[in-house]
Amino acid sequence: MMQNTNSGQVRAGLSFLVTVVALGAIVGLAGCDGGGSAGSGDTIKIGEFASLTGATASFGTASHNGAIMVIDAANAAGGVLGKKIKLITEDDQSKAGEAATAVRKLISRDRVVALLGEIASSRSLEAAPIAQQSKIPMVSPGSTNPNVTKVGDYIFRVCFIDPFQGTVMAKFTLNSLKKTRVAVLTDVRQDYSVGLSQYYKDYLTKNGGTIISEQSYSSGDQDFKAQLTSVKAADPEVVFVPGYYNEVGLIVRQARELGMNVPILGGDGWDSPTLTQIGGPALENTFFSNHFSVEDQNPVIQNFVRDYRERFKKDPDGMAALGFDAAKVLLDAMTRAGSTEPAKVRDALAATVDFQGVTGKISIDPERNATKPAVVLAIKDGGFHFAETIAP
């Protein structure tokens, strides 16, 4: 500690400090001219928050791959509105709280004009209030919980929502499998799973089905034998497990080990190659709702599948297709708006009608949700195979 500092030196130091602070304030004010400033130079800054690591890294990596395919293709063709696009990606690590931090950085530090993300509903629900308050348009590729877009008029999605997805799988149970006695196993830590479970049960019970057993678990659990033993004792014809792939693979495997050979159903949270790595042959006689199928011969889908395979040396999953469509819809909105000003992009997103995406024709409804069909996939011989399409 310096006790004999000359008072003149102190005054000079304070004067220098005040000058630096003042200059910093001026620079800061110069940068605070609204979100549209990120598109006023030679580049358009778009933010992305995704789970590139952690428990659901398969989701984030796939959606990111789809998005960068769109951005790279657009830049190769000259960009949007005569400007190149810069995608700035933050990894939320599949952790609670990190999505909010990531979005704050993208908006305040990077000055992005729009956001892409997230797949997981819980993380989109963290981020959406920040985007809404900042009036920055946010397009979720795959968050299906209905509450996501209810946050506000700047929040959109290109996927169907859980009331529809739950209805699809309940219809499949009753009409295609001809089963009525159902057990449900819900991940109580995921908004996605809780919501999807409820919508499935609502439709099923109103249309002749019966829920004969309800059990719960939490993300990260490894042992499900206690819940599955109770399920087995109820003797269901079908088990509905609307969870994410890491736990689902273990649940299905442990169910088969207990001698439960009934059909097991789920939602789009199953869609990952990791599911088959974990579940293996136990996944025979299982089905899940999804956004597209690589077996669909629509030229739009087959061109996407071909390009994805060439670039990433593997098949795209539904999250890759949704990431692709989210980026496409956003760039299309900017083009139609003739501007990167967030309010104008928001208006153009809201006016999206019959946009031909990989996951179907996308129209944004008044609640900023996508209206489009779902597909049901069957898992057989370690692969995901088209079973049927169910329209809205």
Image: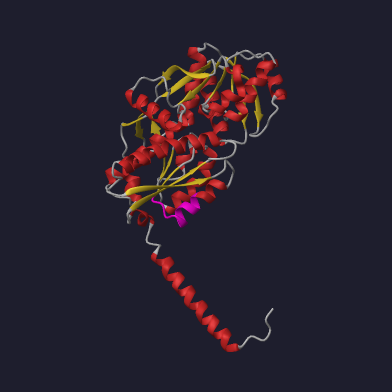
Image vertical order of residue 200 relative to residue 44, above or below: above
Residue 244 location (% of width, % of height): 57, 30
Q: Nearer the viewer, residue 273 or 146?
A: 273
Indicate left or right for 98 with 84 as reference. Answer: right
Determine which quarter of the picture holds residue 229: top right
Q: Which residues are magenta?
A: 103-113
Residue 10 location (% of width, % of height): 58, 84
Q: Residue at x 48, y 26 (%)?
A: 165
Image vertical order of residue 32 relative to residue 243, above or below: below
Q: Residue at x 52, y 77 (%)?
A: 17
**Residue 230 is covered by the magenta coloring:** no
Q: In the current view of this chain or complex, which residue is farthest to the top?
A: 178
Determine which quarter of the picture holds residue 299: top left
Image vertical order of residue 188 relative to residue 279, above or below: below
Residue 348: tell me if it is visible: no
Q: Residue at x 45, y 40 (%)?
A: 149
